[in-house]
Amino acid sequence: MKILLPSLINNQLFDFKPSENWRNIYQKYQEEGVDRNPFVKHFPQEGIEIIQYWINHEQAQKSWADEFKIKYDSTNWYLEILKAQILKEKPDVIYNTTLTVIPYSFIEHVKKKIKKKIFWVCYYGVRRSGEFLNFKSYDFFLTGFRALERELQVEKQKYEFFPQYFDDTLCDKDYTDKRELDLTFLGSLTYPLNDDFGFSYRRRLVQELMDSSNLKCFSDLNTTNNNPIEAIRQRFCALRYELFNLLNSLPPPLPLIKKLPFLRQVADWEVKPTPDYFFNPRLMKHVLSPKYGLKLYNILSQSKMTFNVHGDVNANYGRNRYAAGNIRLFEATGSGCCLLTDELPHLEEFFVPDEEIVTYSNHHEAKDKARYLLANPTKAEDIARKGMNKAWTHHSSKIRAEQFTKFLKQHV
Protein backbone atom coordinates (compact mmCIF):
# COMPACT_ATOMS: atom_id res chain seq x y z
CA MET A 1 0.00 0.00 0.00
CA LYS A 2 1.23 3.47 -0.92
CA ILE A 3 0.25 6.56 1.09
CA LEU A 4 0.85 10.14 0.00
CA LEU A 5 0.87 12.94 2.56
CA PRO A 6 0.45 16.50 1.25
CA SER A 7 1.69 18.25 4.40
CA LEU A 8 2.57 21.70 5.67
CA ILE A 9 5.98 22.58 7.08
CA ASN A 10 7.54 25.67 8.62
CA ASN A 11 9.00 26.99 5.37
CA GLN A 12 10.88 29.87 7.02
CA LEU A 13 13.26 27.81 9.15
CA PHE A 14 16.24 27.56 6.82
CA ASP A 15 17.76 29.64 4.05
CA PHE A 16 18.67 27.80 0.86
CA LYS A 17 20.48 28.85 -2.29
CA PRO A 18 18.02 29.72 -5.08
CA SER A 19 19.30 26.73 -7.05
CA GLU A 20 18.98 24.25 -4.15
CA ASN A 21 17.44 20.92 -5.17
CA TRP A 22 14.26 19.84 -3.39
CA ARG A 23 15.95 16.64 -2.20
CA ASN A 24 18.62 18.65 -0.38
CA ILE A 25 15.92 20.82 1.18
CA TYR A 26 14.13 17.74 2.46
CA GLN A 27 17.43 16.33 3.71
CA LYS A 28 18.05 19.46 5.78
CA TYR A 29 14.66 19.18 7.47
CA GLN A 30 15.31 15.50 8.14
CA GLU A 31 18.73 16.21 9.68
CA GLU A 32 17.17 18.84 11.97
CA GLY A 33 14.38 16.45 12.99
CA VAL A 34 11.67 18.81 11.73
CA ASP A 35 8.70 16.77 10.55
CA ARG A 36 5.00 17.55 10.77
CA ASN A 37 4.13 13.85 10.82
CA PRO A 38 6.98 11.90 12.41
CA PHE A 39 4.87 8.78 12.95
CA VAL A 40 5.17 8.00 9.22
CA LYS A 41 8.86 7.16 9.76
CA HIS A 42 7.62 3.88 11.23
CA PHE A 43 5.45 3.00 8.22
CA PRO A 44 8.06 0.89 6.39
CA GLN A 45 8.09 -1.44 9.42
CA GLU A 46 4.35 -1.82 8.90
CA GLY A 47 4.78 -2.69 5.22
CA ILE A 48 3.55 0.68 3.96
CA GLU A 49 5.24 2.86 1.36
CA ILE A 50 5.12 6.53 2.34
CA ILE A 51 5.61 9.63 0.19
CA GLN A 52 5.42 13.04 1.88
CA TYR A 53 5.57 16.42 0.14
CA TRP A 54 5.83 19.80 1.91
CA ILE A 55 3.20 21.42 -0.28
CA ASN A 56 3.63 24.96 1.11
CA HIS A 57 7.42 25.04 0.61
CA GLU A 58 7.52 27.01 -2.63
CA GLN A 59 11.19 26.50 -3.42
CA ALA A 60 11.07 22.74 -2.85
CA GLN A 61 7.84 22.29 -4.78
CA LYS A 62 9.01 24.28 -7.79
CA SER A 63 12.34 22.43 -7.77
CA TRP A 64 10.41 19.15 -7.87
CA ALA A 65 8.29 20.43 -10.75
CA ASP A 66 11.38 21.51 -12.69
CA GLU A 67 13.03 18.11 -12.22
CA PHE A 68 10.00 16.26 -13.56
CA LYS A 69 9.31 18.86 -16.27
CA ILE A 70 5.94 19.85 -14.85
CA LYS A 71 4.41 23.01 -16.25
CA TYR A 72 2.39 25.14 -13.85
CA ASP A 73 0.82 28.57 -13.58
CA SER A 74 3.00 30.67 -11.25
CA THR A 75 -0.14 32.14 -9.66
CA ASN A 76 -1.50 28.67 -8.83
CA TRP A 77 1.68 26.63 -8.31
CA TYR A 78 0.46 25.38 -4.91
CA LEU A 79 -2.37 23.22 -6.30
CA GLU A 80 -1.04 22.54 -9.78
CA ILE A 81 2.20 20.99 -8.53
CA LEU A 82 0.30 18.99 -5.91
CA LYS A 83 -1.98 17.64 -8.64
CA ALA A 84 1.05 16.60 -10.68
CA GLN A 85 2.52 14.81 -7.66
CA ILE A 86 -0.68 12.88 -7.07
CA LEU A 87 -0.97 11.89 -10.73
CA LYS A 88 2.67 10.81 -10.81
CA GLU A 89 2.65 8.80 -7.56
CA LYS A 90 -0.82 7.20 -8.01
CA PRO A 91 -1.17 6.46 -4.27
CA ASP A 92 -3.73 4.13 -2.72
CA VAL A 93 -4.36 6.55 0.14
CA ILE A 94 -4.00 10.33 0.45
CA TYR A 95 -3.76 11.60 4.02
CA ASN A 96 -4.26 15.35 4.35
CA THR A 97 -3.11 16.37 7.82
CA THR A 98 -4.83 19.80 7.89
CA LEU A 99 -8.45 20.11 6.81
CA THR A 100 -8.33 23.70 5.57
CA VAL A 101 -5.33 23.54 3.19
CA ILE A 102 -6.85 21.70 0.20
CA PRO A 103 -10.08 22.99 -1.40
CA TYR A 104 -12.88 20.48 -1.88
CA SER A 105 -13.09 21.47 -5.55
CA PHE A 106 -9.46 20.38 -6.00
CA ILE A 107 -10.16 16.95 -4.50
CA GLU A 108 -13.15 16.42 -6.78
CA HIS A 109 -11.10 17.53 -9.79
CA VAL A 110 -8.30 15.06 -8.97
CA LYS A 111 -10.81 12.24 -8.49
CA LYS A 112 -11.98 12.78 -12.07
CA LYS A 113 -8.44 13.02 -13.43
CA ILE A 114 -6.98 9.86 -11.91
CA LYS A 115 -8.30 6.50 -13.03
CA LYS A 116 -7.69 4.46 -9.88
CA LYS A 117 -9.72 4.66 -6.69
CA ILE A 118 -7.95 6.65 -3.95
CA PHE A 119 -9.02 6.57 -0.32
CA TRP A 120 -9.00 10.16 1.00
CA VAL A 121 -8.28 10.62 4.71
CA CYS A 122 -8.20 13.94 6.59
CA TYR A 123 -7.09 14.91 10.07
CA TYR A 124 -9.50 17.34 11.70
CA GLY A 125 -7.74 19.42 14.35
CA VAL A 126 -8.29 23.08 13.42
CA ARG A 127 -11.24 25.43 13.53
CA ARG A 128 -13.47 25.34 10.46
CA SER A 129 -14.29 28.35 8.31
CA GLY A 130 -15.55 29.13 4.82
CA GLU A 131 -16.25 26.08 2.68
CA PHE A 132 -14.84 23.86 5.43
CA LEU A 133 -17.82 24.56 7.69
CA ASN A 134 -19.15 21.42 6.03
CA PHE A 135 -17.40 18.05 5.75
CA LYS A 136 -17.10 16.95 2.12
CA SER A 137 -15.05 14.89 -0.33
CA TYR A 138 -13.17 12.75 2.23
CA ASP A 139 -13.84 9.05 2.79
CA PHE A 140 -12.59 9.09 6.35
CA PHE A 141 -11.54 11.46 9.13
CA LEU A 142 -9.21 11.31 12.10
CA THR A 143 -9.21 13.61 15.12
CA GLY A 144 -7.42 13.68 18.46
CA PHE A 145 -9.83 16.06 20.19
CA ARG A 146 -13.04 14.83 21.81
CA ALA A 147 -14.73 18.21 21.40
CA LEU A 148 -14.07 18.06 17.64
CA GLU A 149 -15.11 14.42 17.54
CA ARG A 150 -18.60 15.56 18.51
CA GLU A 151 -18.93 17.48 15.24
CA LEU A 152 -17.96 14.43 13.20
CA GLN A 153 -20.55 12.37 15.06
CA VAL A 154 -23.35 14.89 14.55
CA GLU A 155 -22.58 15.16 10.83
CA LYS A 156 -22.39 11.37 10.50
CA GLN A 157 -18.83 11.15 9.21
CA LYS A 158 -16.75 7.98 9.28
CA TYR A 159 -13.85 8.62 11.64
CA GLU A 160 -11.49 7.23 14.27
CA PHE A 161 -10.08 8.88 17.37
CA PHE A 162 -6.36 9.47 16.77
CA PRO A 163 -4.59 11.61 19.41
CA GLN A 164 -1.39 13.55 18.95
CA TYR A 165 1.91 11.94 20.01
CA PHE A 166 5.64 12.55 20.42
CA ASP A 167 8.52 11.60 18.12
CA ASP A 168 10.19 8.66 19.87
CA THR A 169 13.22 8.89 17.56
CA LEU A 170 14.21 12.31 18.97
CA CYS A 171 14.25 11.59 22.69
CA ASP A 172 15.53 8.97 25.13
CA LYS A 173 13.22 6.45 26.78
CA ASP A 174 15.27 6.46 29.99
CA TYR A 175 14.53 9.31 32.40
CA THR A 176 17.42 11.53 33.46
CA ASP A 177 17.41 13.91 36.42
CA LYS A 178 20.36 15.87 35.01
CA ARG A 179 18.27 18.81 33.82
CA GLU A 180 19.64 22.35 33.77
CA LEU A 181 16.44 24.31 33.02
CA ASP A 182 13.88 24.77 35.79
CA LEU A 183 10.81 25.93 33.85
CA THR A 184 10.40 26.44 30.10
CA PHE A 185 7.83 27.39 27.50
CA LEU A 186 8.20 26.49 23.82
CA GLY A 187 5.49 27.64 21.45
CA SER A 188 3.78 30.43 19.56
CA LEU A 189 2.96 33.70 21.27
CA THR A 190 2.09 35.88 18.32
CA TYR A 191 -0.55 35.84 15.65
CA PRO A 192 -1.75 38.41 13.09
CA LEU A 193 -3.80 41.31 14.37
CA ASN A 194 -7.41 40.57 15.24
CA ASP A 195 -5.98 37.77 17.34
CA ASP A 196 -8.99 35.59 18.02
CA PHE A 197 -7.11 32.34 18.49
CA GLY A 198 -6.42 32.70 22.18
CA PHE A 199 -2.84 33.85 21.73
CA SER A 200 -3.36 36.93 23.88
CA TYR A 201 -4.48 34.71 26.76
CA ARG A 202 -1.48 32.45 26.31
CA ARG A 203 0.86 35.41 26.08
CA ARG A 204 -0.40 36.90 29.34
CA LEU A 205 0.09 33.60 31.18
CA VAL A 206 3.62 33.22 29.86
CA GLN A 207 4.47 36.80 30.84
CA GLU A 208 3.20 36.26 34.38
CA LEU A 209 5.31 33.12 34.79
CA MET A 210 8.37 34.87 33.37
CA ASP A 211 7.88 37.45 36.11
CA SER A 212 7.00 35.15 39.01
CA SER A 213 8.91 31.93 38.29
CA ASN A 214 11.78 32.88 35.97
CA LEU A 215 10.27 30.89 33.11
CA LYS A 216 12.59 30.61 30.09
CA CYS A 217 10.58 31.34 26.98
CA PHE A 218 11.54 30.06 23.51
CA SER A 219 9.32 31.71 20.92
CA ASP A 220 9.29 33.74 17.72
CA LEU A 221 8.18 37.32 18.36
CA ASN A 222 7.38 38.91 15.03
CA THR A 223 8.05 42.62 14.72
CA THR A 224 4.50 43.50 13.68
CA ASN A 225 2.93 42.37 16.92
CA ASN A 226 5.93 42.89 19.17
CA ASN A 227 7.39 46.29 18.44
CA PRO A 228 8.46 47.77 21.81
CA ILE A 229 7.70 51.38 20.86
CA GLU A 230 4.30 50.50 19.41
CA ALA A 231 3.52 48.31 22.42
CA ILE A 232 4.14 51.23 24.79
CA ARG A 233 2.12 53.60 22.58
CA GLN A 234 -0.82 51.18 22.51
CA ARG A 235 -0.76 50.84 26.29
CA PHE A 236 -0.73 54.62 26.69
CA CYS A 237 -3.65 54.93 24.26
CA ALA A 238 -5.59 52.29 26.20
CA LEU A 239 -5.01 54.32 29.37
CA ARG A 240 -6.27 57.48 27.65
CA TYR A 241 -9.34 55.60 26.41
CA GLU A 242 -10.22 54.33 29.89
CA LEU A 243 -9.62 57.74 31.49
CA PHE A 244 -11.81 59.49 28.92
CA ASN A 245 -14.72 57.11 29.49
CA LEU A 246 -14.30 57.28 33.27
CA LEU A 247 -14.48 61.08 33.22
CA ASN A 248 -17.45 60.92 30.87
CA SER A 249 -19.38 58.89 33.45
CA LEU A 250 -18.77 61.25 36.39
CA PRO A 251 -20.99 64.17 37.49
CA PRO A 252 -20.14 67.77 36.47
CA PRO A 253 -17.76 69.49 36.39
CA LEU A 254 -15.35 66.52 36.16
CA PRO A 255 -16.33 65.57 32.55
CA LEU A 256 -14.82 68.88 31.43
CA ILE A 257 -11.36 67.38 32.02
CA LYS A 258 -11.88 65.13 28.99
CA LYS A 259 -11.54 68.24 26.82
CA LEU A 260 -7.84 68.45 27.59
CA PRO A 261 -5.76 68.09 24.38
CA PHE A 262 -4.42 64.59 25.14
CA LEU A 263 -7.98 63.30 25.81
CA ARG A 264 -10.08 65.30 23.36
CA GLN A 265 -9.33 63.14 20.31
CA VAL A 266 -10.36 59.95 22.14
CA ALA A 267 -13.99 60.92 21.49
CA ASP A 268 -13.50 59.99 17.82
CA TRP A 269 -12.03 56.55 18.49
CA GLU A 270 -14.41 53.84 17.29
CA VAL A 271 -12.66 50.94 19.03
CA LYS A 272 -10.69 50.50 22.22
CA PRO A 273 -6.91 50.11 21.78
CA THR A 274 -5.80 46.51 22.24
CA PRO A 275 -2.32 46.42 23.80
CA ASP A 276 -2.69 42.70 24.60
CA TYR A 277 -1.61 42.01 21.04
CA PHE A 278 1.88 43.08 22.04
CA PHE A 279 4.36 41.30 24.22
CA ASN A 280 5.40 43.18 27.35
CA PRO A 281 8.36 45.36 26.23
CA ARG A 282 10.05 44.88 29.61
CA LEU A 283 10.17 41.10 29.09
CA MET A 284 10.72 41.02 25.36
CA LYS A 285 14.53 40.96 25.57
CA HIS A 286 14.35 37.80 27.68
CA VAL A 287 12.54 35.77 25.01
CA LEU A 288 14.91 33.27 23.39
CA SER A 289 14.79 32.05 19.79
CA PRO A 290 12.20 29.36 18.99
CA LYS A 291 13.20 25.71 18.72
CA TYR A 292 11.93 23.04 16.35
CA GLY A 293 12.54 19.37 15.75
CA LEU A 294 15.61 17.93 17.45
CA LYS A 295 16.45 21.27 19.10
CA LEU A 296 12.98 21.45 20.64
CA TYR A 297 13.32 17.95 22.09
CA ASN A 298 16.78 18.83 23.41
CA ILE A 299 15.33 21.77 25.37
CA LEU A 300 12.50 19.61 26.72
CA SER A 301 15.01 16.94 27.74
CA GLN A 302 16.91 19.62 29.70
CA SER A 303 13.75 20.97 31.37
CA LYS A 304 12.62 19.92 34.82
CA MET A 305 9.21 21.41 34.10
CA THR A 306 7.53 22.90 31.04
CA PHE A 307 4.43 25.04 30.62
CA ASN A 308 1.60 24.38 28.16
CA VAL A 309 -1.46 26.36 27.05
CA HIS A 310 -3.85 24.85 24.51
CA GLY A 311 -4.81 26.90 21.45
CA ASP A 312 -8.30 28.06 20.55
CA VAL A 313 -10.04 25.58 18.20
CA ASN A 314 -13.65 26.73 18.71
CA ALA A 315 -14.78 23.10 19.03
CA ASN A 316 -18.20 21.48 19.34
CA TYR A 317 -19.85 24.22 17.29
CA GLY A 318 -18.37 26.94 19.47
CA ARG A 319 -19.36 25.42 22.82
CA ASN A 320 -15.75 24.53 23.65
CA ARG A 321 -13.19 27.21 22.96
CA TYR A 322 -10.30 24.91 23.84
CA ALA A 323 -9.90 21.15 23.43
CA ALA A 324 -7.46 18.91 25.31
CA GLY A 325 -4.80 17.05 23.40
CA ASN A 326 -2.33 19.40 21.70
CA ILE A 327 1.01 18.02 20.59
CA ARG A 328 3.06 19.68 23.37
CA LEU A 329 1.16 17.53 25.88
CA PHE A 330 2.91 14.47 24.47
CA GLU A 331 6.25 15.97 23.44
CA ALA A 332 6.79 17.24 27.00
CA THR A 333 5.84 14.04 28.80
CA GLY A 334 7.68 11.87 26.28
CA SER A 335 10.82 13.89 26.98
CA GLY A 336 10.47 13.43 30.75
CA CYS A 337 9.31 16.93 31.70
CA CYS A 338 6.96 17.61 34.57
CA LEU A 339 4.15 19.15 32.52
CA LEU A 340 2.11 22.08 33.83
CA THR A 341 -0.91 22.42 31.54
CA ASP A 342 -4.35 23.99 31.47
CA GLU A 343 -7.21 21.97 32.96
CA LEU A 344 -9.63 20.90 30.22
CA PRO A 345 -12.33 18.24 29.80
CA HIS A 346 -11.07 14.85 28.56
CA LEU A 347 -7.47 15.56 29.61
CA GLU A 348 -7.70 12.58 31.96
CA GLU A 349 -8.07 10.27 28.93
CA PHE A 350 -4.39 10.91 28.21
CA PHE A 351 -2.80 11.51 31.64
CA VAL A 352 -3.92 11.41 35.27
CA PRO A 353 -4.01 15.01 36.52
CA ASP A 354 -1.73 15.80 39.48
CA GLU A 355 -0.22 12.33 39.24
CA GLU A 356 1.25 12.10 35.73
CA ILE A 357 0.87 15.79 34.84
CA VAL A 358 -0.07 18.96 36.77
CA THR A 359 -3.04 21.12 35.79
CA TYR A 360 -4.12 24.70 36.49
CA SER A 361 -7.55 26.31 36.04
CA ASN A 362 -6.51 29.99 36.08
CA HIS A 363 -3.42 32.20 36.15
CA HIS A 364 -3.29 32.21 39.96
CA GLU A 365 -3.13 28.40 40.06
CA ALA A 366 -0.55 28.36 37.29
CA LYS A 367 1.77 30.63 39.28
CA ASP A 368 1.13 28.87 42.61
CA LYS A 369 1.71 25.37 41.23
CA ALA A 370 4.81 26.45 39.32
CA ARG A 371 6.29 27.91 42.51
CA TYR A 372 5.36 24.80 44.51
CA LEU A 373 6.94 22.39 42.02
CA LEU A 374 10.10 24.48 41.76
CA ALA A 375 10.36 24.43 45.56
CA ASN A 376 9.68 20.66 45.67
CA PRO A 377 11.83 19.13 42.92
CA THR A 378 11.40 15.58 44.23
CA LYS A 379 7.63 15.86 43.76
CA ALA A 380 8.05 17.31 40.27
CA GLU A 381 10.45 14.52 39.33
CA ASP A 382 8.02 11.84 40.53
CA ILE A 383 5.24 13.30 38.37
CA ALA A 384 7.60 13.61 35.40
CA ARG A 385 8.64 9.94 35.64
CA LYS A 386 5.02 8.77 35.75
CA GLY A 387 4.03 11.01 32.85
CA MET A 388 6.97 9.79 30.81
CA ASN A 389 6.06 6.18 31.43
CA LYS A 390 2.47 6.81 30.29
CA ALA A 391 3.65 8.65 27.17
CA TRP A 392 6.03 5.89 26.08
CA THR A 393 3.42 3.22 26.83
CA HIS A 394 0.52 4.83 24.96
CA HIS A 395 1.49 7.92 22.97
CA SER A 396 4.69 7.39 20.97
CA SER A 397 5.00 7.84 17.20
CA LYS A 398 5.59 4.09 16.83
CA ILE A 399 2.32 3.34 18.60
CA ARG A 400 0.44 5.84 16.41
CA ALA A 401 1.89 4.22 13.27
CA GLU A 402 0.55 0.87 14.44
CA GLN A 403 -2.86 2.40 15.15
CA PHE A 404 -2.96 4.12 11.76
CA THR A 405 -2.12 0.85 10.03
CA LYS A 406 -4.94 -0.84 11.91
CA PHE A 407 -7.39 1.85 10.73
CA LEU A 408 -6.32 1.30 7.13
CA LYS A 409 -6.87 -2.45 7.36
CA GLN A 410 -10.33 -1.87 8.80
CA HIS A 411 -11.57 0.85 6.47
CA VAL A 412 -9.66 0.94 3.18
Image (cartoon, rainbow, N blue to C red):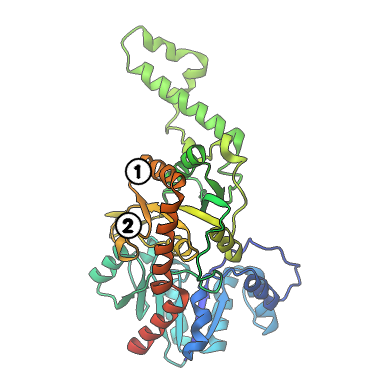
- Depicted 49 relative to depicted 373: above or below: below
SS class, disc 2: loop
SS class, disc 1: loop
Q: Residue at x 41, y 68 (%)?
A: 389
- The type of residue carrying mark 2 is Pro
Going from the N terminus, do you reach mark 2 or mark 1 first?
2
Q: Residues within 10 Å of mark 2 (few under 14, many from 20)?
A: some
- Screen quadrant of the C terminus: bottom left
Q: Is residue 99 visible?
A: no
Q: Kindly identify which residue carries mark 2.
A: 353
Give how far across and how far down residue 8 sits, in percent: 53, 68
Which image quarter: residue 402? bottom left
Q: CA distance from mark 2 to mark 1?
A: 15 Å
Q: Which of the pair 156/45 is nearer the observer? A: 45
Give how far across and how far down residue 278 sits, in percent: 52, 40
Tell me if 144 is positioned left or right of 1 in this view.
Answer: left
Q: Residues within 10 Å of mark 1 (few under 14, many from 20)?
A: few
Q: Which of the pair 322/335 is nearer the observer? A: 335
Q: Nearer the viewer, mark 2 or mark 1?
A: 2
- Depicted 5 relative to depicted 306: above or below: below
Q: Which numbered dot is residue 52?
A: none
Name of the residue lying farthest toward the front:
378
Q: Which of the pair 209/58 is nearer the observer? A: 209
- The type of residue carrying mark 1 is Asn
Q: Contact (CB < 8 A) between labels 2 and 1? A: no
Q: Residue at x 45, y 72 (%)?
A: 97
Name of the residue lying farthest toward the top:
253
- Depicted 347 relative to depicted 103: above or below: above
Q: Kindly identify which residue carries mark 1.
A: 362
Q: Is residue 302 visible?
A: yes
Give how far across and how far down residue 125 sits, in percent: 39, 65
Q: Which of the pair 311/382 is nearer the observer? A: 382
